[in-house]
Image: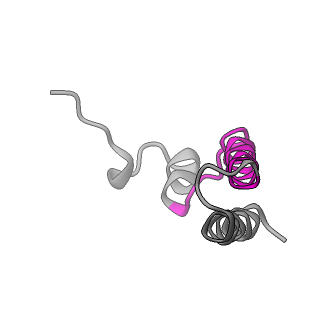
Amino acid sequence: MGLSELISKELENARSICSEYGEGDPHCRAAWDAVEEVLAARSHQPHQPNSLEQHCAENPDAIECRVYDN
């Protein structure tokens, strides 16, 4: 299971628990804490470059990779 799938699962779980127990319930707060932990884990993952970023890393002089400063 990937991190995106885990985030979706935790979000669904938190919504379900909160609709069952109510927003102020400790179960609801714990479920949202789990969502926050998974989101924090995602923010600590290394950046996965997209195809343009990979291309520009390999071909920095390519026209589509130029950066213009005004």
Residue 36 coordinates in the image, percent (x, y): 67, 45
Is residue 6 found inside the magenta-colored segment of the image? no
User: What type of secondary structure mainly makes up the magenta span?
Assistant: helix
Q: Report the label total.
A: 0
Is residue 37 found inside the magenta-colored segment of the image? yes
Side of 33 relative to 61 (left or right): right
Q: Quick one: 25 or 54, which is closer to the camera?
A: 25
Residue 12 coordinates in the image, percent (x, y): 66, 71
Residue 26 coordinates in the image, percent (x, y): 74, 47
Q: Quick one: 7 or 59, which is closer to the camera?
A: 7
Q: Residue furthest right?
A: 1
Side of 17 relative to 58 (left or right): right
Side of 62 relative to 3 (left or right): left
The residue depicted at 65 percent of the width and 45 percent of the height is 47
Q: Quadrant of residue 21?
A: bottom right
Q: Residue furthest left?
A: 70
The residue depicted at 67 percent of the width and 48 percent of the height is 39
Q: Quadrant of the N terminus?
A: bottom right
Q: Quick one: 18 or 58, which is closer to the camera?
A: 18
Q: Quadrant of residue 7?
A: bottom right
Q: Is residue 11 above or below residue 60?
A: below
Q: Quadrant of the C terminus?
A: top left
- The stretch in magenta equals 27-51
Q: Residue furthest top?
A: 70
